[in-house]
Amino acid sequence: MSNNDFDLGRFLPYALNQAAEATSIGFQKNYRQRYGMLRTEWRVLFHLGRYGGMTAKTICDRASMHKTKVSRAVSALEKKRYLVRTPQEQDRRHETLALTRQGQAVYADLYQAAKAYDASLSSHFTPEEREVLNRCLEKIASL
Amino acid sequence: MSNNDFDLGRFLPYALNQAAEATSIGFQKNYRQRYGMLRTEWRVLFHLGRYGGMTAKTICDRASMHKTKVSRAVSALEKKRYLVRTPQEQDRRHETLALTRQGQAVYADLYQAAKAYDASLSSHFTPEEREVLNRCLEKIASL
DNA sequence: TGTTGTTAGTTACATTTCAAACTAATACCT
DNA sequence: AGGTATTAGTTTGAAATGTAACTAACAACA
């Protein structure tokens, strides 16, 4: 109950959120104005751009995003003509999502911006710190 | 443009968000049902509980929360009778917020839960890793 | 075939958040 | 004093999110 040994800034749910918010806002500058996209949308775009066509369900699983979030992001990207859907022959419940040429161009641009932004963040850390950070975040996300 | 050296899971805005989401959901179990509170509310409660009475503006600054978020969280906590407002004599725009006895009891409970939850997360890391994690998150949040 | 269950994805409604406009109190400057 | 600018905090309407119910396609099994 002695309270004084507790530092809110070091409480992981708090500290992680502060850091996540800060970087999220930082990265926003690259896609918000230019492409009118939302957080959920660049995430979906990045999955497709980096790892190739896949179904919405797969994105849900990989990104731990709820299916309604993904569904809406996919619709938005489709409306912007950044992706197209193709129902699968053998099971028409699944639709494979794939970036259009325009979507690929947007991904190429944002992917460069992402690398640059990540590098600028990383410049504040030693390679060892950066490695520890990666490992810790990965582990926490998988709990 | 070679794309293959880019791992979405190691892109900080993405990885931080995944980790933050995971811990946020994990900690929710302690306050959501039991006290009907939201993320913004426990944050405000924790600031007041840990660091004593302060004004809404101060919480905004310390927590990088937008003033409308804080305003609503304060109203909600007030309605639950977890805090009271006292306008300051010398400048009646400021109101000092302070937890009621009931609010302090809730804080005492959640603070214990927070320590326990943080300890359970930390158990997956060495003390050195945990130190690096703290430092990195703090630095990122301050950029 | 028909019934029941499961899965991928969408829709609808309620809650939460964001941005901008607003109020009220104080400060500054003439 | 009087006008303008700031500041703390609230309110309002639009956009985003979460939850649950829904549709459509398939599977399993009698």
Image: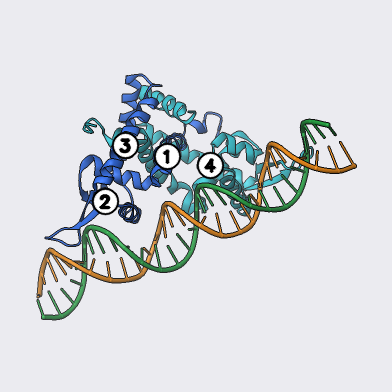
Chain colours: A blue, B cyan, C green, D orange
In primary-sequence order, the first of circles 1 and 2 is 1
Please give the chain letter of the residue carrying mark 1. A
Q: Are marks 4 and 1 on the same chain?
A: no
Amino acid marked by disc 2: Leu
Label 2: state its secondary structure. strand
Distance of mark 1 from mark 3, alpha carbons? 13 Å
Whether residues under marks 1 and 2 lie with C-beta atoms below 8 angstroms apart, the answer is no
Q: Are marks 4 and 2 on the same chain?
A: no
Q: Mark 4 or 2, which is nearer the eye?
A: 2
Distance of mark 1 from mark 2, alpha carbons? 21 Å
Label 1: state its secondary structure. helix
Marking on residue A109: 3
Mark 2 = which residue?
A83
Amino acid marked by disc 3: Asp
Please give the chain letter of the residue carrying mark 4. B
Q: Residue C19, percent across and down? A: 54, 47
